[in-house]
């Protein structure tokens, strides 16, 4: 028996904090379900999409089971061969990328799950970037080796070509597609087959006769790759005394140093090779002690401090995820140093507030297990602490902060309006909770209409939150078509010479400014002071700049922010009595209002970098629907029956694209989208926007 849960894990070397990350349709949730089953955390395997009325353990939200996708990352822990493994299962859809981002921030290692048919896909690239950002070692698990078209060796090649990784094959498949039986371990030189109703019976045997040459060649390739990272192994190879222990040590050391990525394979759905993957996790992925974690000292000008995974040292921990639970805010924490005990005093180093650690729990998806204390390396959750995601807590003896995680900018927005007064109050509660939990979900108000605007990472992202408002808060809302973040700019240089003069009963206002505005590509705005001879007193120059800056928030064409402008001030005049900051601000505003229409203003629209991937047979269709959306194809590649098409497409034409792409490719293609740059909007479309804006302004004027 491989599993089994010891009563206490005292050794740090027996602890692993891992994330399970992947692209959509890689079978990641199925794999996680099997891991929990084989480690005795669950006692039955359930359908991922919830068709059996139960659903996957880690996808506990109704929405996740209905849609068959992971929306929120979920934490659990399990035991394998005397090792404790803290697991965070992350979403595969790019819209929920923040869930992967914060998991990678606190994890020590990861399993990158790939489909043996589809291989490295768009979301794989995003996940790889996140792992690199936080220096997370990973094992690549090539799943779905039982599917038609499965080719794990091609996936290994894609890891090298597309992700620039150094994949080292540790296994070969015994058969493929419907003939997939198990794997050959190139280290132990044994075969592993999996029998029983759920693959729980592992049959260890000799290498199949027909595979001897293939296995020998693959092992020599593995030894050659590993010898680059160990002189001891190189000597052992030359002297023909290579041992399993030496190979495992070399693989582990090179993996932890990010020099290689071990490649394992199997079929989670068919219950094959998951137990061997768990062995790989405990052998090759790092413990908390193997990773160097750093903080900054807030008392010493943010000098770098190296933390030690030692429970005896002063406490340092990071709040990386918040949830509004049944008993209030649930804060997920990674302890980097020291010990956290229930009832102990902790300090938020951002706010300086002291808190009492109340209920302390270890998570198992949506279930909680109360614990009395936790030490360095642990991932736990706590109730009753009001904080933000990314806050650092200490025991009060240190004043340090952990580095924050990367938060991508939202790319899409919607206007939401409650249907009635009851929904208004409930919507406000929901939005407060969602913005606190998810840094990529933003809420604001249109300064003109006062309407509530929500922003997110994609259509699915916003759809999920709107559905959650309805289900969890009974808030019925009406949504408008997404708004595009247009910008305005100028196309030619124009001189200005403007005098602001106003006489009232007392002292008046006087300010004169002269200079020119021109297009500027190096920054959104530049102010260049070239006034000489005291034409404008120095104390009023900042007021002139402030006046011009205030006009950038709203252009005259469609009320969009203005960007790409340089203002040069080279002349002006002041009055000994009537000049003031206000007067020169008004002079700058007047100069702008007079000059802007003459400078050839135009509307800019956001262009998105879109990458579509799917079977080669659909390449023509993918190119067609991109070009129908005013897309400019910037690259196209094809290999092993799969194509990748990259294009720049206006954001305004990308709404509804996921549905169209799925329809055109029978659901076999997927895409990622990120902001690329701003570009001029075609004149005809610009005129439509200007006309619509003027009509709206006329209505408000009435």
Image: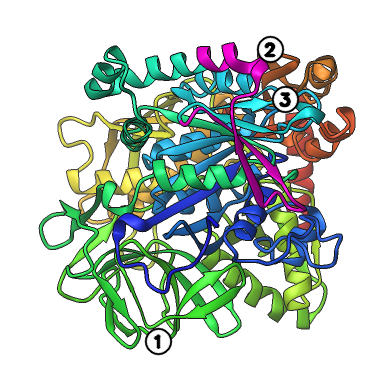
Task: Tell me the quarter of the picture where residue 44 sits.
Answer: bottom right
Residue 343 location, x and y as percent?
Answer: 33, 88
Residue drawn at point x = 29 percent, y = 85 percent: 344
Nearest-to-viewer mark from 1 and 3:
3
Q: CA distance from mark 1 to mark 3?
A: 54 Å
**Crowdedness of circle 1 by 10 Å Cα count: few (<14), some, many (20+)?**
some
Circle 3 sits on which residue? 175
Residue drawn at point x = 59 percent, y = 15 percent: 212
Secondary element at tag 2: strand
The stretch of residues the image draws in magenta is 188-217
Q: Quadrant of the C terminus?
A: bottom right
Q: Earlier in the sequence, mark 1 or mark 2?
A: 1
Circle 2 sits on which residue? 639
Circle 1 sits on which residue? 358
Q: Earlier in the sequence, mark 1 or mark 3?
A: 3
Task: Please say which color scheme the image uses.
Answer: rainbow
Left or right: 467, with 291 as reference point? right
Q: CA distance from mark 1 to mark 2?
A: 55 Å
Left or right: 109, with 475 as reference point? left
Q: Is residue 381 above or below residue 305?
A: below
């Amino acid at each position: 028996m491989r599993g089994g849960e010891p009563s206490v894990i005292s050794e740090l070397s027996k602890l692993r904090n891992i994330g399970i990350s992947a692209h959509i349709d890689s079978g990641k949730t199925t794999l996680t379900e099997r891991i929990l089953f084989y480690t005795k955390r669950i006692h039955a395997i359930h359908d991922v999409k919830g068709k059996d009325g139960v659903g996957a353990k880690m996808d506990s939200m109704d929405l996740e089971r209905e849609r068959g996708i992971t929306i929120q990352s979920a934490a659990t822990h399990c035991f394998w061969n005397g090792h404790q493994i803290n697991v965070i299962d992350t979403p595969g859809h790019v819209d929920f990328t923040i869930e992967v981002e914060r998991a990678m921030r606190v994890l020590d290692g990861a399993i990158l799950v790939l489909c043996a048919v589809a291989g490295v896909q768009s979301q794989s690239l995003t996940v790889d970037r996140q792992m690199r950002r936080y220096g997370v070692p990973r094992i690549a698990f090539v799943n779905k080796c039982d599917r038609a078209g499965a080719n794990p060796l091609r996936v290994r090649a894609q890891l090298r070509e597309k992700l620039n990784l150094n994949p080292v094959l540790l296994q070969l498949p015994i058969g493929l597609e419907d003939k997939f039986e198990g794997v050959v371990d190139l280290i132990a030189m044994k075969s592993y087959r999996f029998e029983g109703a759920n693959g729980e019976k592992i049959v260890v045997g000799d290498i199949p006769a027909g595979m001897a040459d293939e296995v020998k060649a693959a092992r020599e390739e593995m030894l050659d790759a590993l010898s680059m990272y160990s002189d001891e192994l190189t000597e052992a190879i030359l002297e023909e005394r290579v041992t399993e222990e030496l190979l495992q040590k070399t693989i582990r050391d090179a993996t932890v140093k990010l020099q290689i990525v071990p490649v394992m394979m199997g079929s989670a759905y068919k219950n094959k090779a998951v137990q061997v993957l768990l062995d790989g996790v405990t052998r090759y992925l790092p413990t908390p002690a193997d990773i160097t974690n750093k903080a900054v000292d807030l008392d010493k000008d943010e000098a770098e401090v190296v933390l030690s995974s030692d429970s005896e040292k002063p406490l340092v921990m990071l709040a990386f995820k918040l949830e509004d639970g049944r008993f209030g805010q649930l804060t997920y924490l990674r302890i980097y140093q020291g010990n956290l005990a229930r009832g102990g005093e902790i300090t938020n180093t951002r706010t300086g507030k002291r808190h009492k650690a109340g209920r302390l729990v270890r998570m198992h998806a949506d279930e909680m297990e109360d614990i009395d204390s936790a030490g360095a390396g642990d991932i736990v959750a706590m109730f009753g602490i009001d904080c933000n995601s990314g806050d650092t807590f200490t025991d009060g003896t240190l004043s340090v902060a952990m580095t924050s995680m990367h938060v991508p900018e939202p790319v899409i927005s919607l206007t939401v309006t409650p249907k009635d007064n009851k929904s208004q109050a409930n919507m406000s509660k929901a939005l407060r909770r969602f913005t606190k939990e998810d840094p990529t979900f933003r809420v604001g108000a249109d300064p003109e209409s006062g309407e509530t605007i929500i922003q997110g990472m994609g259509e699915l992202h916003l759809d999920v939150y709107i559905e959650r408002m309805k289900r969890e808060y009974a808030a019925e809302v009406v949504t408008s078509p997404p708004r595009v973040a247009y910008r305005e700019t100028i196309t030619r240089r124009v001189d200005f010479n403007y005098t602001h003069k106003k006489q009232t009963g007392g002292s008046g206002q006087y300010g004169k400014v002269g200079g020119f505005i021109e297009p500027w590509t190096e920054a959104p705005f530049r102010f260049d002071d070239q006034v000489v001879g005291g034409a404008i007193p120095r104390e009023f120059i900042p007021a002139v700049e402030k006046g011009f800056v205030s006009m950038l928030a709203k252009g005259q064409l469609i009320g969009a922010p203005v960007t790409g402008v340089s203002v040069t001030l080279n002349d002006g005049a002041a009055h000994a009595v009537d000049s003031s900051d206000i007067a020169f601000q008004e002079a700058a505003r007047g100069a702008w209002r007079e000059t802007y229409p003459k400078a050839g203003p135009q509307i800019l629209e956001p262009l998105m970098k879109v990458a579509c991937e799917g079977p080669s047979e659909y390449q023509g269709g993918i190119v067609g629907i991109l070009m129908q959306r005013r897309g400019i194809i910037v690259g196209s590649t094809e290999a092993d029956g799969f194509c990748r098409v990259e294009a720049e497409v206006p954001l305004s034409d990308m709404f509804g694209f996921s549905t169209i792409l799925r329809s055109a490719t029978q659901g076999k293609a997927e895409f990622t989208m990120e902001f690329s740059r701003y570009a001029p909007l075609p004149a005809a479309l610009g005129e439509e926007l200007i006309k619509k804006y003027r009509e709206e302004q006329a209505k408000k004027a009435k």
